[in-house]
Image: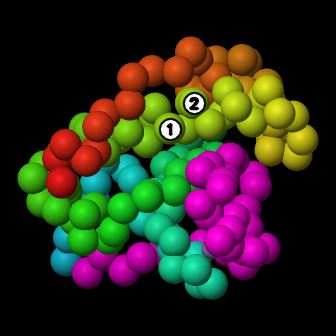
Amino acid sequence: MTCANCEAPDRRLWPANRSPERALVPVPVYFRDPVAWLQLKTCSICEGIWVSARHEPFSSFQYCVLWPYSLEDWWHLADQDLDAVLLEWHNAIREAECLKILDRGGADAEAIRSHDARLGRHGPFVKTARPCPDIESYL
Ligand SMILES: [Zn+2]
């Protein structure tokens, strides 16, 4: 069933300057090291896990990608120092979802276009889709 707040699992990306009605809440990380500038967030309604990365300018443009596995799975990968894989996964999903959103149009597409224009059309999110790491092969 689709979450009325974050729209998971139908939605897989919240682009910059777009967010659910109830903001995604940072997941406490306690004594763990951060993973490659990625931050975990959760939906207060469905407890879906979202992975946030910030982009220029000023790291003020946040893109949240739905993590379709468990929190334990995330830390299992992080504990194996697979930061680069997790970052590549985030990049691949973000780019692929941005391309789909731009095809569909609407408020999400406007937000992406606006960010892209702000960056002089060098945004890190509208390239051709790149291969996505197979996360399940690491679990
Ligand atoms: Zn939700």
- Distance (Cα) linking label 2 and label 1: 5 Å
Task: Specify the amino acid type for callout 1.
Answer: Ile
Q: In this view, does 7 lie to the left or right of 72?
A: right
Range drawn in magenta: 1-30
Query: According to the image, label 1 marks what residue?
Result: 93
Label 2 beta carbon within 8 A of ligand 1: no
Q: 53 or 129: which is nearer to us?
A: 129
Q: Quadrant of residue 11?
A: bottom right
Q: 62 or 126: which is nearer to us?
A: 126
Residue 93, image x and y in percent? Answer: 50, 38
Q: Residue at x 25, y 47 (%)?
A: 136
Q: 88 or 103: which is nearer to us?
A: 103
Q: In which quarter of the image is residue 101?
A: top right
Q: Quadrant of ligand 1?
A: bottom right
Main SS of the magenta part reads loop
Residue 33, image x and y in percent? Answer: 21, 63
The image's colouring method is rainbow
Quarter of the rendering occupied by the C terminus: bottom left
Residue 8 lies within the magenta run: yes
Q: Residue at x 55, y 38 (%)?
A: 94
Disc tally is 2
* Placement of 4 over or under 95, stated as above or below: below
Dot 2: what SS?
helix
Query: According to the image, label 2 marks what residue?
Result: 96
Q: 62 or 20: which is nearer to us?
A: 20
Label 1: few (<14), some (14–19) or many (≥20) C-alpha neighbours in 10 Å: many
Task: Specify the amino acid type for callout 2.
Answer: Ala
Residue 60 visible at all: no
* Placement of 50 over or under 92, stated as above or below: below
Quarter of the rendering occupied by the N terminus: bottom right
